[in-house]
Image (spheres, rainbow, N blue to C red):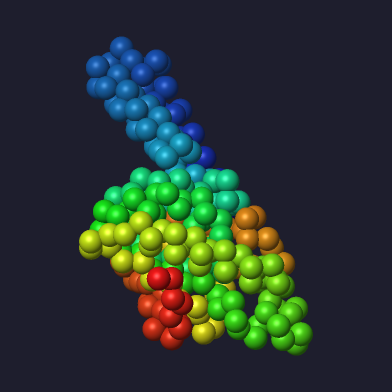
Amino acid sequence: MKNTKRRLQFVGFGVLIVAGVLLTFVWGDIPECWDAGIALLTAAVTTIAYRFFLIDDTTDDFAELAAKLDIHESMRSSGLRQIVLTRQHTNDYTALFSNAKTIDLCFNSGKGTIFTYADVLKLAYKNGCKIRLLVNDAESSVFTDERLSGVVYALGAHMQTVSEIKGTVDKMREIKAVGSKKGTVEVRGAACFISGNIIIIDDKYTHYVPYLPYIPNQNTVRFDFEGGANEYTSKFRDSFREIWEHAKNINID
């Protein structure tokens, strides 16, 4: 079917071009023929340019084009800014954290982000930002139960994660010790096993990193969304809220 459509298109273009050449250069001394020939050649060139340069080779009809537009519209409405591989290509959160009013963070241990941006988080907290951090519960049996060791390891956690969580909690104590009149810093240990990183900054930015079995966290796929909550990013916000409500408080005073 596709090949038939292409052949018909080529035949149509050929007829336009041949007719345009005959009218313009063979019978061009007749004014009406010259005008008609130029019109046909212009139409042929315009149509060919549109078909082969503005629409890619996979677009065979308007239905396919409409489907592509729907995909682009869904991506636009989701606020998806980029999909990247590896931690090296993620955003620098310095500016986003510095000017934030609320920061919600959800990690396996949080060591990488919290230690990297500790000074920025101190400044944000001092300026009145409300910071909430969710980490895996260091006292959870998932880290000690041999029956769960394979699952935990597959999702990127291990016994070293326990010490990393404790180190992250200590760093949050350090951040809170800076003091703030309006800012708050809270940390909770999740009742469930956290299976992905979530960063939510005000209504401006959402970052999500799924934990893929046997794929190191630093090498997995990362999704960045810009703008306020929508039907897509609200899923991450809802998940954070549910985990937070069921998590236990960790004292960092």
Is residue 60 toward the left or the right of residue 193 in the image? Answer: left
Q: Is residue 82 visible?
A: no
Q: Is residue 184 visible?
A: yes
Q: Nearer the viewer, residue 234 or 43?
A: 234
Q: Position of residue 43 (x, y in %)?
A: 35, 33
- Splitting the image into 4 quarters, where does residue 46 fall? top left
Q: Nearer the viewer, residue 201 or 235?
A: 201
Residue at image x 68%, y 60%? 216
Q: Position of residue 144 (x, y in %)?
A: 71, 83
Q: Nearer the viewer, residue 169 or 207?
A: 169
Above or below, 17 against 134 in this view is above
* Quadrant containing the C terminus in the rendered view: bottom left
Is residue 100 toward the left or the right of residue 108 in the image? Answer: left
Residue at image x 58%, y 46%? 88
* Quadrant containing the N terminus in the rendered view: bottom right
Residue at image x 36%, y 19%? 24
Q: Position of residue 116 (x, y in %)?
A: 51, 50
